[in-house]
Image: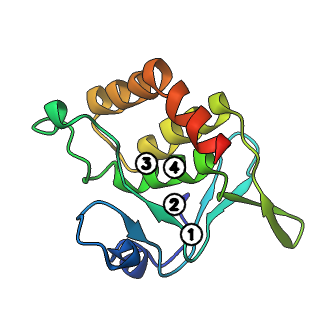
Amino acid sequence: MPFHSRLDPAIRPILKDGLPDGRNVLFLEPVAFVRSADMARFQIPVGATTDGASTPALLWPGIPPFGVHWLPCCLHDGAYRRYLQRLDGTVWVPAGLTRAESDALLFEAMGCFLVNPTIRALIYEGVRIGGQAAFDQDRAS
């Protein structure tokens, strides 16, 4: 399996900064993912935050913010927000993925989680069409 972590604590999120918004969460343990093309290892580090899938509320009946696609979306958040790490020898370094690489990683991770192909395609197309503003905002901060 391409995710190499004990997922039970990783997906047992706690609210970010204690805010009761129900969306933003903090990782209690690192979660690693191996990209199939080159076996590159990536990690969401402890303390990283995410809001899960940033799907518009209008789409929540079909694509809610949480679901089987949630962890791949967290990986994608890490790539956009620059906290995703890549293993370089024996040291974790910033992954530094481009937007296209980040989106491709999301697509692959959703496939590993057996996200419904239609949902997978819709989420991927959504980030390809509408993700530039989020990418730019995340990189500016």
> What residue sits 37% from the left and 55% below the top?
51
In the picture of the structure, the residue carrying the numbered disc 2 is 1
Name the spot of residue 11 as percent of width and height, x first: 36, 71
For the residues labelled 3 and 1, the Cα–Cα distance comes to 16 Å
Q: Amino acid at mark 2?
A: Met
Q: Amino acid at mark 1?
A: His
Ranked by sequence position, the earlier of labels 2 and 3 is 2
Which circle, 4 or 3, is nearer the viewer?
4
In the picture of the structure, the residue carrying the numbered disc 3 is 73
Q: State the SS at label 1.
A: loop
In the picture of the structure, the residue carrying the numbered disc 4 is 77
Ranked by sequence position, the earlier of labels 2 and 4 is 2
Q: Is residue 129 visible?
A: yes
In the picture of the structure, the residue carrying the numbered disc 1 is 4
Which circle, 2 or 3, is nearer the viewer?
3
The answer to whether the residue labelled 4 contacts the one labelled 3, judged by CB atoms less than 8 Å apart, is: yes
For the residues labelled 2 and 3, the Cα–Cα distance comes to 17 Å
Which circle, 2 or 4, is nearer the viewer?
4
Quadrant of residue 132 within the rendered picture: top right
The answer to whether the residue labelled 2 contacts the one labelled 1, judged by CB atoms less than 8 Å apart, is: yes
For the residues labelled 2 and 4, the Cα–Cα distance comes to 21 Å
Ranked by sequence position, the earlier of labels 4 and 1 is 1
Q: Is residue 130 above or below residue 45?
A: above
Q: Which mark is residue 90?
A: none
Q: Amino acid at mark 3?
A: Cys
Question: Of all residues shown, which one is farthest toward the top?
Answer: 129
* 35 vs 83, nearest the viewer: 83
Quadrant of residue 8 within the rendered picture: bottom left
Name the spot of residue 114 as percent of width and height, x first: 35, 45
